[in-house]
Amino acid sequence: MKTVYLDNNATTMVASEVLDEMLPYFHDYYGNPSSMHSFGGQVAHKLTEARQRIAALLGADPEEIIFTSCGTESDNTAIASALANNPTKNHIITSRVEHPAVKVLCEHLAQKGYRVTMLPVNAEGLLDMDEYEASLTADTAVVSIMWANNETGVIFPVEEAAHLARERGIPFHTDAVQAVGKIPINMKSNSIDMLSLSGHKLHAPKGVGVLYIRRGTRFLPFLIGGHQEKGRRGGTENVPSIIGLGKACELAAGNMEKENTYVRSLRDRLETELLTAIPQSKVNGNIEKRLPNTTNISFEFIEGESILLLMDQYGICASSGSACTSGSLQPSHVLRAMGVPYTMAHGSIRFSLSVYNTAEDIDLVIRELPPIIAKLRVLSPYWATSQGACATA
Amino acid sequence: MWEYTDKVREHFLNPKNSGEIENPDGVAEVGSIACGDALKLSFKLDENKRIADARFKTFGCASAIASASALTEMLKGKTIEEAMKITNQDIADYLGGLPPEKMHCSVLGQEALEKAIENYRGVSHKKPDEEIVCVCFGVTDGEIERAVRQNHLTTVEEVTNYTKAGGGCGNCHEKIQAIIDRVYATKKPEEGPLERPKLSNIQKIRMIEETIEREIRPSLKHDGGDIDLVDVIGNRVLIARRGTCATCQASHATMKGFVESKLKEFVSAELIVEEVAS
């Protein structure tokens, strides 16, 4: 059975060009880039190249790139550094829909005594910028707001938010893990101080991330040890993965156009056809301000895990915001923050595409999902009731 | 991804007895859409008062659907009395086990069964004495207590897995712990004549002091003696002799025996008196 992979916001396939570029650095060129001999030195040259490629995708200077182990490390490092550099300030601003790498960290900091403002979102998942501006105070040590939401794909105006923070001298961090490679980013034209990205979301391997730190931003390292990354992040570099990430960023720059035309059209067709074929279904999140690869659709009166497992029979991979899949007993915190009713939140499915998806992939979902939804609705005690209500209304 | 047994997968992919029975003998609906799973169960009896047909409708995950499907299969051919004996563990066992986090699906099945039988018997299932402990999922103290007793649950996390209580805001964790403590505190010993309730340390010390004051000290003072309570460690009561008792070697054995017998009588049979240097 062919795998139809529509879960690219969870992780992506390592591109074959990326893998090819990585492979020599496991067995043949295994030197330590910090070594004095040329065997290690040639590896250091490849790291320099990777740093340049990553910087190019972000419109950044290579000096502003620090390699980390993952998006979570980048997020934690950025926030911890900002707090350590502003020891007299006690206020953190973030949003209610952040990834756990930021959300749980901020909850943890709140327990330690920091005052944390978690900005709400509206029914479409959008921030109220007036409310954001009003929350900026002289006591604010850092703002951390995601660029694009992993569950809905909704894009936040982080450049505008960073500008408002800059005017007040407040450091601004963004978790751009879902945005990098999908929408154009140019750090030369914004005021964002720190930005996190993760390799495995853009066809590089798992276990490598980047923290962008704008030149001139005060910084304190999170991992203290060797002189790697100019003392900003100790630990021997994950050489093959960093080289892979460099290649992935180069590919992403070349695929940006395709993301926003080809992938977008696949996503739009999937969404439109499903909404047409399946009654009482609805998109979660603003339709316009959204990543081109993501759609989050709720199918009323049924539960997401059941949908996922039945789609699994056809090799279709997606995600759900239902309680049974969120690892807790509550549905996704993102959908709850948006006020999506329980009848809808439990039955939400996220499809996230990549440039490697085909029209056939989309055809398969459009063909197989409507009968799956119908089958589960026949089992649901609420479906008949709702239909009866509609019929008599 | 959940590790489901083949049996769970089979009942999920091809559920048995889905639907509703027209004019059922017993019917019940438990759970809610807010909670993430709900089950409507109906059954019909044959002329011999055995369950001829049982049907379900489920809103929920794979294990909720499989649990309901399994339950309806288990019910067929049973009398009401036999059906009443089915526990959530029986449903889980029938499916070859459920992941710990999914045990609440089997509990939902048992609840639906009980309420459907109550419906058949015309008994109201309202339990006015029960108090909602978990507001997020609407779970009562009675439901938690029963899950704790039946499944020998000892932690809040286990209670959440079985009943969902405590899985939302988490504000009720202390109350759940109190219910667990209560269940094990009042669990009577299998044998032994003692029926006295288990005491907390504070209660025990208070009762020891009262007993000394009321039952022991007056007798000792009569002879110009006294004792002090030094400490209570578990069931060991440490005392020190005072007054004439302190120097009277002969009093040692008799006094220890006297104090101990009084404390055993009025406080707890498990107490042992030990004398310590003041």
Image (cartoon, coloured by chain):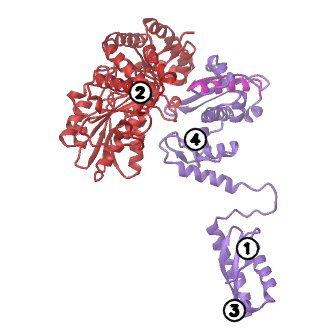
Q: Secondary structure at mark 2?
A: helix
Residues drawn in magenta: B53-78
Q: Mark 2 sits on what residue?
A: A38
Task: Tell me if label 4 and label 3 are in contact, CB under 8 Å.
Answer: no
Q: Which mark is residue A317?
A: none
Q: Mark 4 sits on what residue?
A: B160
**Mark 3 is on which residue type?**
Gly
Earlier along the polypeptide chain: callout 4 or callout 3? 4
Note the chain letter of the red one: A
Give the letter of the chain under mark 2: A
Q: Secondary structure at mark 1?
A: helix
Q: Secondary structure at mark 4?
A: helix
- Mark 3 Cα within 10 Å, few/some/many (few <14, many 20+)? some
Task: Tell me if label 1 and label 4 are in contact, CB under 8 Å.
Answer: no
Q: Mark 3 sits on what residue?
A: B243
Q: Secondary structure at mark 3?
A: helix
Earlier along the polypeptide chain: callout 3 or callout 1? 3
- Mark 4 Cα within 10 Å, few/some/many (few <14, many 20+)? many
Q: Mark 1 sits on what residue?
A: B266
Q: B160 and A206: which one is in front?
A: A206
Give the letter of the chain under mark 1: B
Residue ranking furthest to the front: A37
Task: Tell me if label 3 and label 1 are in contact, CB under 8 Å.
Answer: no
Note the chain letter of the purple one: B
Q: Is residue A43 left or right of residue A125?
A: right
In three-dimensional space, the C-alpha distance between marks 2 and 3, rounded to whole angstroms, equals 91 Å
Q: Which tag is nearer the camera, tag 3 or tag 1?
A: 3
Query: In percent of the image, x 38 and y 48: which residue is there?
Result: A110
